[in-house]
Image (cartoon, rainbow, N blue to C red):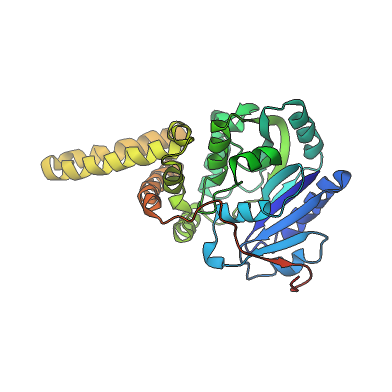
């Protein structure tokens, strides 16, 4: 009836807890747990292979990205429902029964999520995420425009739109999925209850930012826009993905800075101080405002580079190794 897909990369510290919670959640349904590994070099596979789960690994590690990990898990699904989560999450065992009942009672709904409890908020990004959660409509209970942080999906709906996650996307794969589902007439919902506990990054925000630049994560918004060009969900992407608006505003700001540097150098100071001040007010602190200002600039550059990145057709299957024992291959 249900498969829980867990995408992982070097998660030896959290993978056992993630698998144990997932197995507990699917047990009443005689369900399946699939670990989709993107090329771990630590003990993730060794640990996972000790559990009664299906472990698959991306054959070509150069294809590693958020979208590829999610799609790899979905490629091994043959159940009615599919729940996707990250390997640093612990699924609440009582969530699946309520989510399945909701989908059965609401035939127009393709996916349902719950609250994502952030258990580690040391870095700037997660502090901002927690502070702004109440202001983001897609994180509040009710019908939503995406299921960030994972959710339970009706496999029939995913088959209808062709694929679960775009294998080209380094970020925003859940938003892209939601946009494609909406354009096909489906809806998404979030229940007013916990779905998972998330034990995110313990590193500082700027260290995480540098890591995301190297991994290509910051190109995500541009890649989503590139994928939507000429597609039915293009309008949804342009209207709903706020990162596109933020990046466009920053690019316009860059142009204004250059023009001011040429024609009115004294205007450079307020042009820098005003956006930092606005973000500091919105985030509740100068430190978080400066972090957001920096990240918005990184995101603007990522938008441009993501738009130019070469794509593979998202319906093309990903090559995978199926691992059946501790280090063994089937």
Quick check: 24 left or right of 240? right
Q: Position of residue 312 (x, y in %)?
A: 48, 56
Q: Position of residue 323 (x, y in %)?
A: 73, 67
Quick check: 90 left or right of 207? right
Q: Position of residue 61 (x, y in %)?
A: 56, 67
Quadrant that contains the N terminus? top right
Q: Residue furthest left?
A: 263
Quadrant that contains the C terminus? bottom right
Q: Between 106 and 128, which is closer to the camera in this rendering?
A: 106
Image position of 237 with respect to 53: above or below: above
Quarter assignment of residue 65? bottom right
Q: Answer whether residue 39 is visible to the viewer in this image.
A: yes
Image position of 14 with respect to 247: above or below: below
Q: Between 65 and 163, which is closer to the camera in this rendering?
A: 163
Q: In percent of the image, x 19 and y 38: which residue is there?
A: 267
Q: Residue furthest bottom?
A: 328
Quarter assignment of residue 157? top right
Q: Position of residue 113 (x, y in %)?
A: 68, 36
Quarter assignment of residue 49? bottom right
Label count reads 0
Q: Answer whether residue 87 is visible to the viewer in this image.
A: no
Q: Between 233 and 238, which is closer to the camera in this rendering?
A: 233
Quick check: 128 left or right of 111? left
């Amino acid at each position: 009836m249900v498969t829980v897909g867990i995408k992982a990369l070097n998660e030896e510290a959290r993978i056992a807890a993630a698998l144990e919670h997932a197995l507990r959640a699917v047990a009443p349904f005689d369900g399946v747990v699939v670990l989709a590994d993107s090329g771990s070099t630590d003990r993730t596979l060794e640990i996972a292979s000790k559990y009664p789960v299906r472990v698959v690994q991306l054959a070509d590690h150069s294809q590693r990205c958020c979208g590829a990990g999610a799609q790899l898990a979905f490629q091994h699904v043959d159940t009615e429902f599919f729940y996707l989560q990250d390997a640093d999450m612990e699924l609440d065992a009582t969530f699946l029964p309520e989510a399945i009942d909701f989908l059965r009672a609401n035939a127009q709904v393709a996916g349902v999520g719950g609250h994502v409890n952030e258990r580690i908020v040391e870095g700037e990004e997660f502090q901002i995420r927690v502070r702004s959660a109440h202001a983001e409509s897609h994180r509040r209970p009710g019908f939503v425009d995406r299921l960030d942080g994972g959710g339970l999906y009706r496999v029939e709906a995913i088959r209808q739109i062709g694929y679960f996650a775009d294998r080209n996307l380094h970020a925003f794969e859940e938003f892209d999925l939601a946009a494609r589902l909406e354009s096909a007439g489906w809806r998404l919902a979030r229940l007013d209850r916990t779905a998972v506990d998330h034990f995110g990054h313990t590193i500082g925000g700027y260290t995480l930012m540098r890591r995301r630049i190297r991994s290509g994560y910051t190109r995500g918004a541009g890649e989503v826009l590139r994928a939507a060009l000429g597609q039915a969900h293009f309008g949804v992407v342009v209207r709903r993905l706020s990162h596109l608006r933020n990046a466009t505003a920053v690019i316009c700001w860059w142009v204004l800075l250059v023009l001011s540097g040429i024609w009115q150098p004294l205007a450079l100071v307020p042009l820098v101080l005003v956006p930092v001040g606005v973000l500091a007010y919105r985030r509740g602190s100068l430190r978080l405002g400066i972090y957001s200002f920096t990240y918005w600039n990184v995101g603007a550059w990522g938008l441009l580079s993501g738009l130019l990145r070469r794509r593979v057709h998202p319906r093309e299957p990903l090559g995978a190794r199926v691992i059946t024992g501790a280090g063994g291959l089937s």
